[in-house]
Image (cartoon, rainbow, N blue to C red):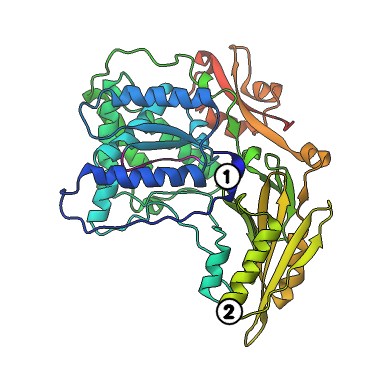
Amino acid sequence: MNTFSRFSRSLTIVLVFATLVGCSVSPDYDKEIGAKNAKVVEIQMGIYDLDSLQTYVSAVGYRLVSHLGEQPFKFEFHVIDDPMPNAFAIPGGYIYITRGLLMLMNTEDELAGVLGHEISHVTQRHSVKQMQSSVVPGLLEVPGNIVGVVSSDLGNLINAPISTSNQLFLAGYSRSHETEADTLGATLAAKAGYKPAAMGDVLTRMNTSIEYITDQSIEKSYFDSHPYTPERVKNLNQMKGKLTIASSQPIDAAFPQPLDGMTVGENPNKGVFIDQQFIHPTLKFVIDFPNEWTTVNQPLSVGAFEDKQQGLVVLSGVGNNYDAKQNADRFKFAIEDRYNLEVKIIPTTLSDGTVGYLTTLKSDGEDTTNFLNQMWLDHNEGTYRVASLATELLQESVLESMNSFRAMSQQDYDKLTVKTLKVVDIDSSDSLEALNKQYSSHIDLELFKIINGIDENSDTTEMPKVKVVIEQSYQ
């Protein structure tokens, strides 16, 4: 799917929760809802496009699956283009791990431990069992539609999804399900030749990194529906002596070499914010949003909203079936026909010469007048819509934002950088601080230690490779 198609595709998620009794539901149910929502994950989160990394992660996953024995699910493994550390599974055999979590890994054993854990959620059908226990699992976070100021039907015409979260999360598994997945995942890892307790190192490192970045300690109450990480690590370590590790060579003995070249942080190919300015180098446009508004970038849309929810601006693609003028005309006809309201289309020339077709509807309330603005415009090979809702006080600000849309210039490209992970060789004479500086690593020394699993007890003379983060110009 090309970038514009993903950006322009509106999304409707329909989750049908049947009445489930016992374990009578066929695995075909898992396959059905899994296949539907795998498409949602791909559209909303995006699959990372480093083929060598996708191939490697899949190879480790399939080695684990080969030790499951006969089971009804066909597994798939995907790297998600997300800087936040996370891994999740959806029913039917779809396993996902983010760039952010891979960045924290230092051995193939750790990767196998995480994948084994998620595989076990699938084989034990934990998501379906959560439904059975009357915990509706909100399988994916569904973005809310903008509510129109004239009617809910009008809101549906806008249909520009926006959410304050860039993530898709499974609902929390029960403590017993998490413990079972830990146990079965570790057992599966050992059968495939991996250290069964290695996932504990990743869990600890993930906690440490989050605590460092947020400057907040993760308390036990944070894991109300999950076993607390130290307890999980302790349990995993206790399993080491009870499991026999099969003799097997790693898929890549040079780990973390497979991570070399992986994007770190926000991926500029998906568009990035620099302060309140959004730059999308793949789609080649720029748009400014009002100062101090909360900004949101999703694969389907980008936008910003005023913190008191008095204003909202959203940009999304509308496909290629109609050009900008035709879209505006269709909207005008639909509203005038259905609501008997006069709609004026105002051609508006933007700073780069692009012509946008603006419509404004207003609704007089008891305390203020509310405005619904929509502008359609053609850019490169796509047609876009900028929609806004605002009170009278913010109407000027949202129109200014809408009119700021323009094609990218070379100056805009020059603003962009991309951070990538580089795996480098070290020798015993290298100090960690000198090494981090030598490669102009764009993380501080403490975070450098965290992502490489280095603490006061580490013997760095036995580390042939470390990960550093380098920053380069986008072009």
In which quadrant of the rendered view does residue 73 lie? top left
Mark 1: secondary structure? helix
| Chain part drawn in magenta | 85-92
59 lies left or right of 150: left
| Label 1, residues with CA under 10 Å away: few <14, some 14-19, many ≥20 | some
Of the residues under marks 2 and 1, which one precedes in the sequence? 1
Residue drawn at 29 percent across, 39 percent down: 122
Q: Is residue 354 above or below residue 250?
A: below
Q: How many marks?
A: 2
404, above or below 372, in the image: above
Q: Nearer the viewer, residue 129 or 51?
A: 51
Q: Position of residue 211 (x, y in %)?
A: 52, 44
Q: Going 33% across and 32% down the picture, which residue do you hit? A: 75
What amino acid type should be assigned to the residue bearing mark 2?
Tyr
User: Label 2 crowding class (10 Å Cα cut-off): few <14, some 14-19, many 20+?
Assistant: few
Whether residue 277 appears in this view of the structure is no
Asked if residue 150 is positioned above or below residue 253 in the image, the reply reads below
Q: Position of residue 334 (x, y in %)?
A: 59, 70
Residue 336, given in percent of the width and then of the height, sits at: 62, 76
Residue 455: say if magenta.
no
In this rendering, would 161 be left or right of 175? right
Rendering coords of residue 172 (x, y %): 35, 51
**Rendered image: mark on residue 287:** none
Q: Are marks 2 and 1 in contact (CB under 8 Å)?
A: no
Who is closer to the viewer here, 282 or 359?
359
Q: Relative to residue 166, is residue 338 depicted above or below?
A: below
Q: Is residue 248 visible?
A: yes
Mark seen at residue 339 = 2
Residue identified by numbered label 1: 5
Q: Nearer the viewer, residue 309 or 16?
A: 16
Amino acid carrying mark 1 in the image: Ser
Front disc: 2 or 1: 2
